[in-house]
Image (cartoon, rainbow, N blue to C red):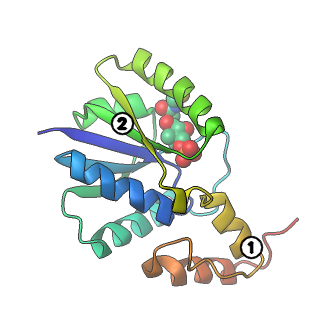
Amino acid sequence: MKIAVIPGSFDPITNAHCDIISRATKIFDFVHVCVLTNVNKKTMFTSEQRVDMIQKVIDSMGISNCKATSYEGLLSEFTKKVSAVATIRGIRNISDYEAETAMADINFRLNNALETIILLSRPEFRAISSSVVREISAFGGDVSEFVPSIIVDDIKAHYNRKESFLP
Ligand code: PNS
């Protein structure tokens, strides 16, 4: 059984992530979508909220060979724990490519049984990012074009509960 991990911050999951998940689950027997800590980012949603949203989306897409989870530690450790042979990342542009090659090199040093597989974002998803979704939401804008419909209300509710996300 070939197992892969799609790691990320998913703060929150977007349609671009969904496209990668859908494509990865057609290549691998089982895919773990794993919320990990990016030490360079402050997140808007808790790890638990992000896992819940991802699982809701996976279920709504009718994908059965995929599960959302979180891990507090290194991606290389998590991949060993679940016996994954590959980690999958989507890239949109040259800056993503540079960051991903650096990360792939480090992950390979930490777990040399691990392949990093890069999937190119489809053109229609290239401009979508979690940070764009957070910015639009912070200004009360509509993000329904950028995230799965099943989590639109979760995102709205989250932002409505807070007084202000702006400086
Ligand atoms: O969605 P992101 O923020 O680009 O995802 C980055 C993430 C979370 C996959 C990366 O920061 C990560 O792997 N964090 C876990 C810690 C780790 O393994 N770091 C070493 C890789 S250089």
Callout 2 touching callout 1 (CB < 8 Å): no
Q: Quadrant of the C terminus?
A: bottom right
**Quadrant including the N terminus:** top left
- Which residue lies at the image location 67% right of the left edge and 78% below the top edge? 159
As drawn, the label of residue 3 is none
Give the residue at mark 2: 87
Is disc 1 placed on a helix, strand or loop? helix
Residue 138 disc label: 1
Q: Which image quadrant for residue 5? A: top left
- Residue 97 shows in the view: yes
Q: Amino acid at mark 1?
A: Ala
Q: Position of residue 27 (x, y in %)?
A: 23, 46
* Of pointers 2 and 1, the one earlier in the residue sequence: 2
Q: Position of residue 82 (x, y in %)?
A: 24, 38
Q: Is residue 3 above or below residue 46?
A: above
The residue carrying pointer 1 sits among few (fewer than 14), some (14 to 19) or many (20 or more) residues within 10 Å by Cα, namely: some
Residue occupying image coordinates x 22% and y 33%: 83
